Each structure stands twice: as C-alpha cells, then as structure tokens.
Image (cartoon, rainbow, N blue to C red):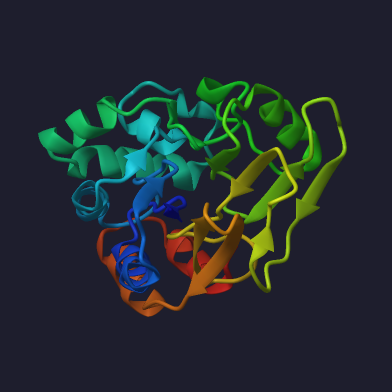
Amino acid sequence: MRIGILGDIHGNTEALSAVVAVMKNDGIDVWVQVGDIVGYGPEPSACIDIVRELGCITCLGNHDAAVLGRLDTSYFNNFARAAIQWTAKQLRPSDFEFLANLKYVESRDEFTVVHGTLHLPDQFGYVISPVEALDSLDQQATRLCFVGHSHVPAMYLRRGAATTDIRAINQFDDEVSYRDYERVLINVGSVGQPRDEDPRAAYGLVDTDRQVASIRRVQYDIPGVQRKILRAGLPEVLANRLSLGV
C-alpha cells in the first residue's frame, strides 16, 4: 500500500494543486491529510473541495478548529488571528459542516492521523524533538503515525515499546527504511506554508510493502498565491513568508 500524506494546506490552492498533480504519478492507494486545510491562505473553500474529492482521511487542525469557534485564538499571533477572522467569513455552509465532522484523531489498521501531539490531541502541541515524539509514541497503537502542525518535516523511529531511544531524522535526501522499527512517527511538513527555509511544498509518501518513507518537495507558483493573498486584503507578511519558507 502506498500512502500519500498531505501536510498543513492553509488555503494555498497553488501549492496543493501542484503537490496533488505530482502525487497522482506516485500511484497513491490511500490519501491522508493531517489538518489545517484552512487559515492563512486565500482559497480555503477550494482547498476543502480538493481534499474532499481525493477522499482524504483527515483530522482536525487548530486553524480548522478556530474557524469553527472551538479554539480560543487569543494565543494566535495577530496575523494568524486576522486570517482566521477573514476565513470564517469566506467559508460556505458545506465547508463548516465538513470541518465540524472532523475528529482530533483518525485511526486505521496500519496508521494514525493527528494534527499535533497524539497524547494531547485537543491541545495541539508541537512535535519538534524526540522529547515530544516520545510522549506521542507512548500513546501510538499503530505502527505508523502522521502529524503536522510545526510545518517542519521530521521522522521519529522507535525500535520497541520499552526503549526511550528515539532515532530522529530531519534531513531527507532519499527514502528512509523503517523495517527495523516498531513505531514510526512522521511529521510531513506543510503543503501550503513550509517553515524549514525551503519554500517548496512538502508531502509525505509511505510504501508499507517496502517499509520505506520519504518527504518530497514540489515547486509551485508562489507569486500567484502571493497576489491572491494581497488582493484578499490578508496581512502582507503572510504573502512574504512564502518566498522564504518561514
């Protein structure tokens, strides 16, 4: 089985369309999306439509929860809060219904999907080091778990349930074999707003037959989405950061 994993999209249709076009050549059997379809970007409804058309197994992200009014945005920075307020005015009733039906955690036989940490999924904590990864791995009932939220790709591998020794991988030049590991947690980065100083859109690909995983990057029309952000009246910083991958 080949699993294609979409990270945080954030209303960026240009990035999402470019990634999906490439992924369709990867022979994807199961599509996954790790939350935050909306927020920051100028086309939230279009991105929801694409995720629905792909039949993605999707969980609730913090920006998704915020536009539903389920999450206090006082801890958001001013730009993120402004984008949430703008997004909430753009969404169709069907968009709200779709987001409202998303769960914090989705599980299948071989994998689990959660936006932030698995041990506290409704608090949207970040997995940014082996410390946070260990807390989630302790709760992980499936061999594979896919997360997002930090917008920075990483992979955490654990040989057995009794060990606290976690192998962390932050550079992805090729496929990573997880054959010798009992638990694998993969942060797939972000489709629509990477923050690892690489502005290209990111996605994850896992082949469960070969037991390999990879993070892949795709060029997309950054100036195009920047123009849309500015035309929408969203904060200029949300456009500028896309060119920098921050």
Q: Position of residue 190 (x, y in %)?
A: 50, 56
The residue furthest left is 93
Q: Position of residue 111 (x, y in %)?
A: 50, 37
Residue 114, visible in the rendered structure = no
Horizontal placement of 64 versus 200: left or right?
left
| Rendering quarter of residue 94 | top left
**Residue at (52, 55) in percent of width and height:** 209
**Residue at (52, 71) in percent of width and height:** 217
Horizontal placement of 74 versus 87: left or right?
right
180 in relation to 69, above or below: below
**Residue at (33, 66) in percent of width and height:** 20
Q: Quadrant of the C terminus?
A: bottom right
140 in relation to 113, above or below: above
Q: Position of residue 193 (x, y in %)?
A: 48, 59
Residue 99, visible in the rendered structure = yes
**Residue at (36, 78) in percent of width and height:** 221
